[in-house]
Amino acid sequence: MSQETALIVRALRAEDEPVWRELWKAYLAFYESTLPEQVYASTFERLLGDDPRDYNALVAELDGRVVGLAHYLFHRHGWKIEEVCYLQDLYADPSVRGKGIGRALIEGVYKAADDHGAPSVYWLTQEFNDTARQLYDRIGVLTPFIKYQRP
């Protein structure tokens, strides 16, 4: 990428809170969800915390502006010795889609997983998320699993 379109993926920082909040609210709106204020505050605190059970976050900066986020966590798995990595949230501002933001964030999570010794990274998306699935089909493997949850 040229100097004019410098893309950087980095860890979330405390000063990112306002833009992180805007991006996460937009992500949740895409999935027709909203959350109470205490969840935003708690989630951001956990993303910056050092409890190994908590989430981690990466952000993507394009030309010095935070334009995307990824939330992920590591957890044990009954079929593996090493932990696995769950990519829970991935979002890029619609104004910068098609510029490699999503791919760069996923690759950042892949690197974090490798550094953690977790060779498996997985995520979920809704069936109708066609735009994101075009990327996911290129950098991941679609599994045959169907998700159920408690009503």
Image (tube, rainbow, N blue to C red):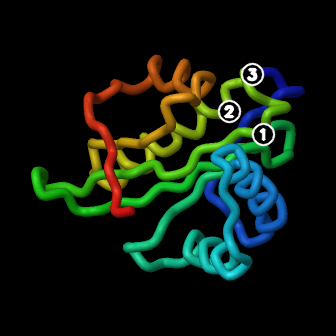
Q: What is the quadrant of the C terminus in the image?
A: bottom left
Query: Which corner quadrant of the image does residue 30 belong to?
Result: top right
Q: Earlier in the sequence, mark 1 or mark 3?
A: 3
Q: Residue at x 34, y 62 (%)?
A: 150
Residues tagged 2 and 1 counted as in contact (Cβ below 8 A): yes
Residue 67 locus on image (x, y percent): 78, 43
Residue assigned mark 3? 1
Please name which of the two marks, 2 or 3, marks the residue nearer to the observer. 2
Above or below for 82 versus 141: below
Is residue 71 or residue 35 the one in the foreground? 35
Q: What is the quadrant of the N terminus in the image?
A: top right
Asked whether, in this view, residue 52 is left or right of residue 118, the answer is right
Kind of element beneath mark 3: loop
Q: Residue at x 71, y 56 (%)?
A: 24
Q: Which disc is residue 93 wearing?
A: 1
Above or below for 5 versus 78: above
Q: Which disc is residue 101 wearing?
A: 2
Label 2 vs label 1: CA separation? 9 Å
